[in-house]
């Protein structure tokens, strides 16, 4: 008999690595190859908006040909079946890709925003957009020209949906971090909050994360393999 659990999942770039999307801090990671201050800060965008728009347009192009991997599919299965059992899965992702949704995830909370959404710096309007970001784009909400940016959270900006995230942490029976280095706050602090609430914690990663010590249980290996096996264990296969 599988007990209904409220499971809080925190996913990071490692869950999408086997779909061909680069992580940030691995040897070939985005921030290992380029200076995040130039590409992922409001100051960098103000200094060189053309370069920043090109960087995110290139990531949109790569995402269009990427596909969810077995880890994304396993998490979508967990959400479906745990919900059917009377439990819940709150999938908080640091990722800006849409692979959790394309795998069938229904309750995906993007705390760092979404790559396939464009925002207007003038009116804060935002809309789904999979095409290139350019200075000629017209805001779909206010009609301004040249005010478009990717609707992602840059360093120095406030993460999104924090009220919902804190509420879900308080309601969780189990906290599982998947494919994240545990190096960026506030996400990296969620495991300590979970522990303080008496919630069981587990990390599933290719290698020990920066906050591995904080987890009750640790599973190491490729997400496509280890997440699939862990979901099967939780669902009593
Ligand atoms: N399976 C499981 N884990 C993997 C795999 C894999 N196939 N490949 C890499 N990993 C692990 C790495 O070992 C690393 O610990 O995924 C983690 C990725 O860490 P980061 O590159 O730091 O990505 P992430 O933790 O998501 O970064 C957090 O930092 O720059 C910001 O906004 C950005 O959301 C991002 C945040």
Image: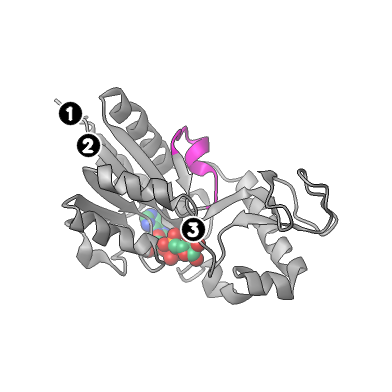
Q: Is residue 159 visible?
A: yes
Q: Nearer the viewer, mark 2 or mark 3?
A: 3
Extent of the magenta region: 96-107
Q: Secondary structure at mark 3?
A: loop
Residue 145 included in the magenta stretch of the image: no
Residues at marks 2 and 3 touching, judged by CB atoms closer than 8 Å: no
Along the line of sight, the residue nearer the viewer: 144 or 100 = 144
The image quadrant of residue 91 is: top left
Find ligand 1 in the image and state its quadrant.
bottom left
Residue appearing at x 75%, y 52% in the figure = 132
Quadrant location of the C terminus? top left
Identify residue for label 3. Answer: 159
The location of residue 157, given as percent across then percent down, is 54, 65
Residues at marks 1 and 2 touching, judged by CB atoms closer than 8 Å: yes
Q: Please tell me which of labels 2 and 3 falls first in the chain.
A: 3
Identify residue for label 1. Answer: 2
Along the line of sight, the residue nearer the viewer: 168 or 226 = 168
Disc 1 from disc 2: Cα separation: 7 Å
Magenta stretch: helix, strand or loop mostly: loop
Residue appearing at x 52%, y 74% in the figure = 32
User: In the image, which disc is placed on residue 234?
Assistant: 2
For this orientation, the residue located farthest to the left is 1
Determine crowd level at label 2: few under 14, some 14-19, many 20+ residues with C-alpha closer than 10 A: some
């Amino acid at each position: 008999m599988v007990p209904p659990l409220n499971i809080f999942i925190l996913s990071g770039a490692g869950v999408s690595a086997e779909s061909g999307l680069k992580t940030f801090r691995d040897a070939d990671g985005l921030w290992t190859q380029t200076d995040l201050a130039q590409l992922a800060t409001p100051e960098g965008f103000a200094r060189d908006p053309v370069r920043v728009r090109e960087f995110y347009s290139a990531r949109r192009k790569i995402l269009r040909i990427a596909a969810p991997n077995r880890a994304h599919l396993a998490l979508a299965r967990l959400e479906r079946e745990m919900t059917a059992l009377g439990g819940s899965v709150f999938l908080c992702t640091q990722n800006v890709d849409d692979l959790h949704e394309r795998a069938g995830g229904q309750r995906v909370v993007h705390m760092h925003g979404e790559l396939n959404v464009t925002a207007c710096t003038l009116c804060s309007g935002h809309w789904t957009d999979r095409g290139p970001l350019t200075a000629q784009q017209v805001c779909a909400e206010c009609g301004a020209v040249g005010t478009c940016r990717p609707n992602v959270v840059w360093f120095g900006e406030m993460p999104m949906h924090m009220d919902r995230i804190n509420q879900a942490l308080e309601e969780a029976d189990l906290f599982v971090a998947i494919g994240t280095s545990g190096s960026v706050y506030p996400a990296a602090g969620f495991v300590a909050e979970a522990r303080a609430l008496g919630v069981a914690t587990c990390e599933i990663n290719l290698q020990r994360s920066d906050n591995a010590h904080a987890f009750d249980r640790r599973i190491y290996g490729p997400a496509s393999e280890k997440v699939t096996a862990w979901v099967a264990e939780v669902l009593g296969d």
